[in-house]
Image (spheres, rainbow, N blue to C red):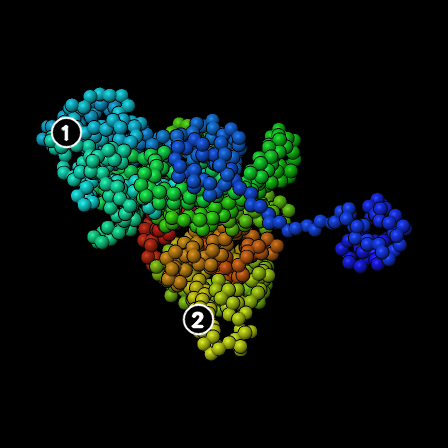
Amino acid sequence: MPSTSGGCGEQGGALHLDKSEYVNSGSQGAEQMEAGGGDEYDDSSKFQNIKQPQTRKKTKKRKSLISLNVSASKYEIVRKVAEEFGNLTSADDDPACFLFWNDTAVSNERIAELKPYQRVNHFPAMGEICRKDCLARNLAKMMKVHPDEYNFSPKTWIFPAEYSSFQTYVRELKRKNKKRTFIVKPSNGSMGQGISLFRNGERIQQQDHTIVQEYLDKPFLLEGFKFDLRIYVLMTSCDPLRVFLFNDGLVRLSTEKYSAPSDTNVDQLYMHLTNYSINKRSENFERDEDVTKGSKRSIQYFNEYLKRNDYDVAAIWKNIADVINKTLVVAEPHVLHAYRMCRPGTSGNDSVCFEVLGFDIFLDKSLKPWLLEINRAPSFGTDEKIDLEIKSGLLYDALKLINMRPSDKRKGMAAQKAESRRRLFRPSKRLDLDLTEPDRKKLVLDRRKEELKEKLIHIRQENAREDFENRNMGRYQRIFPPQDKSSRDRYRKLISDAFNIFLAGRANSLQKEIAKLLSGSLREDEIIDMLQACDIENDGKQKAFKGPKPLSSMPSVVDEVTESDSRASSPTSSSPHNSVSNFKTRLSVSQSQSQLSKGISKTPIPKRPQSAQKSTNSRPHSGRLLYADQRSKSVARTSESQHASFDSEMDEVTSVVVREEEMMRKTLMALNDMRIKFPGKTDEEADIILNQIQENWKYHKPRIASYWLVKLDSIKRRKVIDIVKSNVRAVLQRTWRCPDVECLKLWRIFYRLFNRLLWSHGQGLWNCFSSNTSCSWDAIFNKNKEAVSGAEFMCCQRVIELCRQCLLIVYQFAAEAKLSIPAASGESSPTKQLSTRSSNPRPSPWLHSSPHKAMTPVSQRMSRLYLNKSLDNLAP
């Protein structure tokens, strides 16, 4: 018999009894034991009242659901789709739900009250394109500036303001003996209400809130019937603008065979109008379960119909997407301005608004798309099977694209608290007056870093959002922003003009912000480089040059050059005339370059950073090689077919690596064959000039520093770098046979390098003349994730040399241009001795000898040499 003092716990290891608990629960058993003896006592009753320990069961974490409020919608399909995303609530019991769906427009006050995690299915000021009169007015303004771009809307008059101009147009048609049909619509009407047609424009009376359009009388017919397309467009954000096109929609046919409008059939609305609300009352309206039949069909069927008849479907939809984008470009200034007024200080955050728009598109007989109207509250009724299939899909994919997550509520509230705390503890501007100069500079750097960090966060958020959209678009397709660069540039111009037209005289800060965004956005790696530069300057490792004071600490003249420097230079200078003739600047490494480096810098070639000292296999294709290497351990156990596949994979990888090495070798050779061309001088004379600058470096050093760092502004400094940049780009395009060099890793490295040279008002390039290796240009590779090979590093070294030589040539050219007039009057200067010419100079293909060449402006002389990269006003 087990002991009564907790032995059960010791034997089983699972039951542990407390002593006091045992006394209370087992007193009755103890009395029985004393009365009847221990052998006959059954101790099972002793444990009846003892609480058994409860084992913890692993329960699955319940997935938290979001709450959606669709009580303001009358459509059952909206309610059913919303149930798949969360719990449906009403406005009374859950005002803090994630989504509010309304069939009508939402007031600006309601949008302003929304929390950051909440969404509503309407944008403010969308009536600027959804009201027929506002749409006509805004399109007419854009058409004055871009008549070729905005020619997709019928000619429209807004009554009563444009009644007189309409009558003038009618009289002009009558004088020319021309006939036109006009259609009259209410400005804010819907479902075909109040629409009428007129053959005689003089019979149209002046009415309020009415528009008159020219009737498009040459439609593309489908089985003899006139039709239009109801296209569904999702707009997820206005800051920045993001637009998605659903890949299906409705083809709405009229119910009577079409014939050109005449005095006898102008009143037959079932023939000339395609509105579903009108034609469904016709006795000829056909309802069919098949989407290829009936008076309402799918766009997918329409695409198949066009393909069967040999029409270019891709070109048609490209034109339709272009019409949609241009229309939303017109709305963007109004919507963004109203959205910022409702939610100030939310730039770059997730939009609390989204909207599903219904575009009514008409195709004429040449398949040109015409915009009829836009519905901000398209019908989601499901009278037929085709409605259920299309509208349920577009609603589901739309709610998925706006990316509502349960964690957004917690993150949004935390962000609001952080923003409030930041505003509360923001230092006063008055404190800046009491700071010393170093502290004030440090404060400016800190503010600059905060701005860069905000931009970096914004860019990463945009990248994350784009990645989410690419994975969850479903049946949507993103049409804005477009993928190709030419379309982006074209729309950027249209958006800029739209802001200038519609926001003229107001919202100046918004216009400046948009202009800055449209001028070009920074990439993530560029911002990281700028943050690193701020850290270096803030830590005191490098002081920005802001005047002639620091000239005393510029690099000194040295007479020795390291072995690595001599290896980096070209071993020969025998072929300066064999440079590529189609380059704007011809550049190459010669013996004079080695001598120039000898006098300018005592710095050895910077060692490769740690990331670059790894194996040269760390190239863009190295992942495949690593994968093959990992699999090589199990090759011995595979079949012969696996051996063959592995060998073929290794051969492919080897060929890729060999091809890349060959291309890199050709690139380095092309860069070494390039050399600076001094305007009006031969290559030998340019070498002599560079040698003389090297020999008199102590004399030229402060003057070059003052010219580069003080006298040239940021635009002119960038033009100097662009001389090398544009030609290096041309080398890559020709060598790699790639017109778009942005996809090349080597160009991305060069791009960061050029930005580094312009860092801190040109201090980056000037540091390349210095012996201080702690601030060398190769610091851009320290935090770079991509490994840099030895050949890539040598190419960077060569580009640095080209930029240094370019600066010296531009400086000397500007100095000679400045001294040309005093030289003509008999004055002398020590700098004049640098422009020594040979007895028989080679004629320049750009410049012609002229007795008045000294009077030619610098900009004209330089523009003859550099066709697209003119150096206007570079002379100090």
Q: Nearer the viewer, mark 1 or mark 2?
A: 1
Which amino acid does the dot numbered 1 rest on? Arg
Label 2 CA crowd tier, 10 Å (few <14, some 14–19, many 20+): some
Q: Is residue 695 visible?
A: no
- Using the image, determine if residue 17 lies above or below residue 270: below
Residue 190 in the image: x percent, y percent?
A: 30, 30
The structure residue drawn at horizontal position 55% and vertical position 57%, both measured from the top left corner, is: 785
Query: Which amino acid type corresponds to the residue marked 2 in the rendered image?
Result: Glu
- Please, what secondary structure does the residue beneath circle 1 have? loop
Which residue in the structure is indicated by mark 2? 652
Q: CA distance from mark 1 to mark 2?
A: 72 Å
Count neighbours of disc 1 (C-alpha within 10 A) and say few if under 14, some if 14 to 19, many if 20 or more. some
Sequence-wise first label, 1 or 2: 1
Q: Secondary structure at mark 2?
A: helix
Q: Residue furthest left?
A: 177
- Residue 152 image label: none
Q: Position of residue 580 (x, y in %)?
A: 37, 62
488 left or right of 412?
A: left
Residue closer to the observer: 88 or 719: 88
Please give the count of numbered marks on the rendered protein.
2
Q: Position of residue 644 (x, y in %)?
A: 45, 76
**Does 441 sit above or below residue 751?**
above
Q: Is residue 57 left or right of residue 577?
A: right
Residue at 49% from the left image edge and 36% from the top image edge = 88
Note whether residue 766 is visible. Answer: yes
Q: Quadrant of residue 338?
A: top left
Residue 325 location, quadrant: top left
Tell me the number on the disc at residue 199: 1
Q: Which quadrant, please, contains the N terminus?
A: bottom right
Please tell me which residue lies in front, 429 or 405. Answer: 405
Q: Please name the residue shown 41% across and 57% down the image.
A: 741
The residue at the point 37 percent across, 52 percent down is 866
